[in-house]
Amino acid sequence: PARQVMSYIDWETRGGKKPALEWLIELMSRHPLRRVASDQRVKGTIKKIYAERDKAFAYYKENLKLFGKVSFIDLTRAHLLDLRFTPYYLYPNLLYNVMLKSVRGDYKLSVGSNPWKRSKIKINIGLMLKKYGGGGHKWVGGLTIKPASRTDAVIQEIIAKLKDIFATSSAVA
């Protein structure tokens, strides 16, 4: 029930929306989460979320590109849920995922590492992305690519760096 209520709130507030949630707060203050999750408004939204999740999952399965231990997904033309851990579910041996999105006309690149393979991650992603005007921390980072004409080159360069790091660390190990 807690995940369903949390998913409902996340869905209703996505994209910076500020919905009226007073009814939900009132319900949560008076009833257990199981009762809150069974509310028809919550259940209806959860049903939509599951349908969107299934659509996004199918898109990932069909469009995820693999480059050794690195994957890439282009979400610029697909307005889908961000299922950032899906690449690691589909391919458990992946170490990194690179994701491209279009946000208000800008290209946003996110780079993440497999949270279940932390011991094999050999680079600080935030520091790597600093060279491109981005940032983050050891495990994840992002950047806005400007001008847009550089998008393909930047993506290829980052994927190559991630592949090289893995190849180098494998040769040493």
Image (spheres, rainbow, N blue to C red):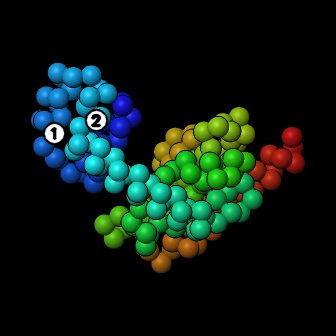
The type of residue carrying mark 2 is: Ser
Residue under circle 2? 38
SS class, disc 1: loop
SS class, disc 2: loop
Q: Quadrant of the C terminus?
A: top right
The type of residue carrying mark 1 is: Leu
Left or right: residue 60 compared with residue 76: right
Please indicate, yes or no, whether residue 129 appears anywhere in the rendered image. Answer: no
| Image point (64%, 37%), residue name | 116
Left or right: residue 168 compared with residue 146: right
Of tags 1 and 2, the one toward the viewer is: 2
The crowding category of the residue bearing disc 1, from other C-alpha atoms within 10 Å (few below 14, some 14 to 19, many at least 20), is few
Residue under circle 1? 21
Q: What is the number of the mark on residue 100?
A: none
Considering depth in this image, is 101 or 163 the residue closer to the camera? 101
The answer to whether residue 95 is above or below residue 109 is above
